[in-house]
Amino acid sequence: MALRAVRRTRAARLPLQGRQQPWWTAVQIRNHRYAIAELAYQNADGAWVGVPRESYNYFVEAAGMGPGPYAFRVTDIYGQVVEDSGIPFLEAGDSAGAAQLGDCQ
């Protein structure tokens, strides 16, 4: 089996899992250019908090991220970072991201 990177030009999407609640939050990044290494959200104090990835490819914050809106920092396997803010709380919905990861250098 061989794997190859496929270039994506549109912005990443941030779907929130159906059982999303302010006290339990799951996020899956879609339409990203490269594999995602890390996801962090900005808490009420302004600090970035890393979110663990589950085996089913959602990043789950068991204690929740609060009622939103959210700010996320996405890091790909090449170390490129995209920050996006103003992501609304959506019960089982998609939120369009504002940016895409850059080309690999």
Image (cartoon, grey):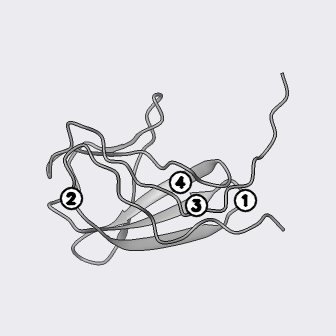
Q: Amino acid at mark 1?
A: Tyr
The quarter of the image holding the N terminus is: top right
Q: Badge 2 local density, few (<14 within 10 Å), some, or many (20+)?
A: many
Question: Which residue has dot 1 on it?
Answer: 78
Question: Which residue has dot 3 on it?
Answer: 75
Q: CA distance from mark 2 to mark 4?
A: 21 Å
Give the image quarter of residue 28.
top left
Secondary structure of the residue carrying tag 2 is loop
Residue 38 — which label?
A: 4
Question: Which residue has dot 2 on it?
Answer: 89
Disc 2 vs disc 3: Cβ atoms closer than 8 Å? no
Q: CA distance from mark 2 to mark 3?
A: 22 Å
Q: Is label 2 or label 3 in front?
A: 2
Q: Amino acid at mark 4?
A: Glu
User: Where does the image place residue 51, in percent across and percent down from the top left?
Assistant: 39, 51
Disc 3 vs disc 4: Cβ atoms closer than 8 Å? yes
**In this rendering, would 53 be left or right of 41?**
right
Give the image quarter of residue 17.
top left
Residue 59 — which label?
A: none
Which mark is first along the chain, 4 or 2? Answer: 4
Q: Badge 4 local density, few (<14 within 10 Å), some, or many (20+)?
A: some
Q: CA distance from mark 1 to mark 3?
A: 8 Å
Secondary structure of the residue carrying tag 3 is strand
Which mark is first along the chain, 4 or 3? Answer: 4
Q: Is residue 18 positioned above or below 44 on the image?
A: above
Q: Amino acid at mark 2?
A: Phe
Which mark is first along the chain, 1 or 4? Answer: 4
